[in-house]
Image: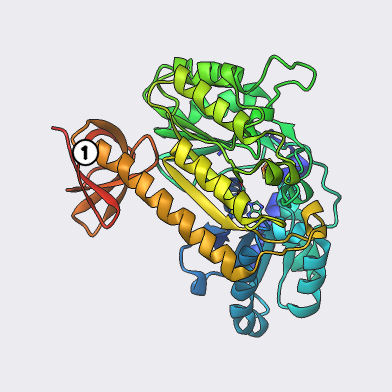
């Protein structure tokens, strides 16, 4: 938990809320998170807030008094899954009006979704914004007092509240947001609309959280932001940027690994690559979303780089950081994507040789610029392209994994399974399975020995 300044009014309010929750018989909460790591990080705060008012987390959704759904708006499929989930809760929350269903996150930042929930899902108790989590206790109290569907009607202030309590989900990985929002307005993307404009945390607050997490035994720190390269400690100080922040954080001499996401190819450059090269704690696998290998499509997406510029970035990084690897995101079937555009993507993927790819079928998002364009690639064509690209990438990924066999790799134990095996994560975030039970959160040197069903098997070096 982070420190909260003592404020008697606030303490009074929290006591009132705890009493009210207790008198309504609400003692446990289940939180389901859809979407990205930033959403997971928000859920750690939601859990922290609920714990601070006496609510205990549970993994059992069916027995929970409170169900929280933290939603994602990046693609239509995520929204469909959320609506399916809410629908499955209808009987329970209609019958048990004493229980509380709360829906928050990016989906409910969209007025048409709020309208839809208000009209068709009256058993939902609270709709809240994750840009404004400080308002959550107030919303809960209002709902308990009125029994009505309660909306977060505060305008998003986009102020960063450093006093929100936090309850980390994982024991080995600490998620640390460094900035929120995005100003890039890629034409397909809903994030700038639902997450608001870019704003950064103060580097002192980030350093404090970073050093505390390491002191608490976390071995992997993941720095988060929609566009980490836009990190600015001070809006007027262009020099105190993401590379500087990494330098500052990595002055901590303990044994840990740092990851960050997400970098934008238009901003990630030599200063960042030199900083990564200078600190062995920073992962050598960089996520650098390409989206498309076609210059026409990149321009229509407002990505502000060409395929040649992207390749130049990759080559610069490879010259500066020995053994650097890249992972990426690709969107298939953006409006107007021709076979030639898609082939340009295939070609760039073959040239760069990413360690792994996240491939998404284009999803039209209301309010974005691309939504005005005709979504003109037939679904079967999108699926065929997706399969073709997946097949090529699988071969490349397999080649990388084969090259690891027999080598010594540093890995963090992340999960014990089947009571006899342990899963660990390599620097490139791949999972490797070894025999025996090893404590989650410890570093080991592992030697990959085989690949079974596309997964690495190995042993721990004694
Ligand atoms: N359709 C499909 N994929 C999308 N992404 C973002 N918006 C969309 C969309 N409308 C993908 C991008 C981004 C990743 C997080 O999600 O590839 O990098
Ligand atoms: Fe969306 Fe582009 Fe911002 Fe990433 S950089 S969050 S894809 S608008």
Residue positioned 66% across, 30% down in the render: 266
Is label 1 in a helix, a strand or a loop?
loop
Q: Quadrant of residue 157?
A: top right
Question: What colour scheme governs how the chains and residues are painted in the rendered image of this protein?
Answer: rainbow
Displayed-image quarter of ligand 2:
top right
Residue positioned 47% across, 17% down in the render: 320
Q: Quadrant of the N terminus?
A: top right
User: Could you tell me residue 107's position as x and y percent?
Assistant: 71, 60
Residue matched to label 1: 405
Residue positioned 56% across, 26% down in the render: 313
Residue toward you, 65 or 284: 284
Q: Quadrant of residue 28?
A: bottom right
Residue positioned 60% across, 17% down in the render: 244
Q: Quadrant of residue 106?
A: bottom right
Residue toward you, 436 or 143: 436
Q: Is residue 25 visible?
A: no
Alpha-carbon neighbours of circle 1 within 10 Å: few (<14), some, or many (≥20)?
Answer: some
User: Could you tell me residue 456's position as x and y percent?
Assistant: 26, 47
Drawn side of residue 393 relative to residue 19, left or right: left
Drawn side of residue 240 relative to residue 348, left or right: right
User: Could you tell me residue 341's position as x and y percent?
Assistant: 62, 49
User: Could you tell me residue 113's position as x and y percent?
Assistant: 77, 67
Drawn side of residue 328 relative to residue 157, left or right: left
Residue toward you, 137 or 353: 353
Q: Quadrant of the C terminus?
A: top left
Residue 41 sits above or below residue 216 on the image: below
Q: Is residue 390 visible?
A: yes
Residue toward you, 462 or 345: 345
């Amino acid at each position: 938990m982070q420190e909260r300044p003592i404020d008697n009014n606030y303490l009074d309010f929290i006591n009132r809320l705890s009493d009210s929750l207790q008198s309504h018989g609400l003692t446990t909460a289940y939180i389901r998170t859809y979407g990205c790591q930033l959403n997971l990080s928000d859920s750690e705060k939601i859990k922290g807030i609920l714990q601070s008012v006496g609510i205990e987390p549970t993994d059992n959704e069916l027995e929970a008094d409170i169900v929280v759904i933290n939603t994602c708006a990046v693609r239509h499929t995520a929204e469909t899954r959320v609506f399916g989930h809410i629908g499955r809760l209808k009987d329970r929350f209609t019958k048990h009006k004493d229980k509380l269903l709360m829906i928050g996150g990016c989906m409910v930042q969209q007025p048409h979704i709020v309208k839809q929930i208000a009209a068709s899902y009256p058993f939902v108790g609270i709709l809240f914004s994750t840009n404004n989590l400080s308002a959550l206790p107030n919303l809960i109290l209002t709902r308990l007092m009125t029994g009505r569907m309660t909306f977060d009607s505060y305008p998003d202030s986009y102020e960063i509240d450093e006093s929100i309590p936090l309850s980390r989900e994982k024991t080995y990985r600490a998620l640390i947001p460094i900035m929120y929002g995005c100003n890039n307005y890629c034409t397909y993307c809903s994030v700038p609309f639902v997450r608001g404009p870019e704003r950064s945390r103060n580097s002192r607050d980030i350093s404090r959280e970073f050093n505390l997490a390491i002191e608490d035994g976390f071995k992997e720190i993941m720095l988060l932001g929609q566009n980490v390269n836009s990190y600015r400690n001070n809006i007027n100080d262009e020099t105190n940027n993401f590379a500087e922040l990494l330098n500052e954080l990595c002055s901590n001499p303990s044994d840990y690994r740092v990851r960050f996401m997400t970098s934008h190819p238009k901003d990630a450059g030599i200063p960042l690559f030199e900083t990564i090269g200078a600190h062995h704690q920073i992962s050598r696998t960089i996520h650098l979303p390409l989206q498309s290998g076609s210059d026409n499509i990149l321009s229509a997406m407002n990505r502000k780089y060409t395929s040649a510029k992207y390749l130049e970035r990759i080559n610069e990084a490879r010259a500066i950081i020995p053994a650097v690897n890249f992972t990426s995101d690709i969107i298939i079937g953006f409006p107007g994507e021709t076979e030639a555009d898609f082939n340009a993507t295939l070609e760039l993927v073959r040239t760069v040789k990413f360690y792994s790819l996240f491939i998404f079928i284009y999803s039209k998002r209301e309010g974005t610029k691309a939504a005005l364009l005709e979504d003109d690639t037939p679904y079967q064509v999108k699926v065929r392209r997706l399969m073709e690209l997946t097949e090529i990438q699988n071969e490349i990924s397999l080649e990388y994994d084969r090259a690891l066999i027999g080598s010594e790799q540093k890995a963090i134990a992340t999960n014990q399974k089947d009571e006899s095996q342990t899963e660990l994560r390599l620097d490139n975030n791949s999972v490797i399975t070894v025999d025996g039970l090893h404590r989650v959160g410890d570093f080991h040197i592992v030697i990959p020995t085989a690949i079974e069903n596309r997964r690495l098997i190995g042993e721990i070096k004694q």
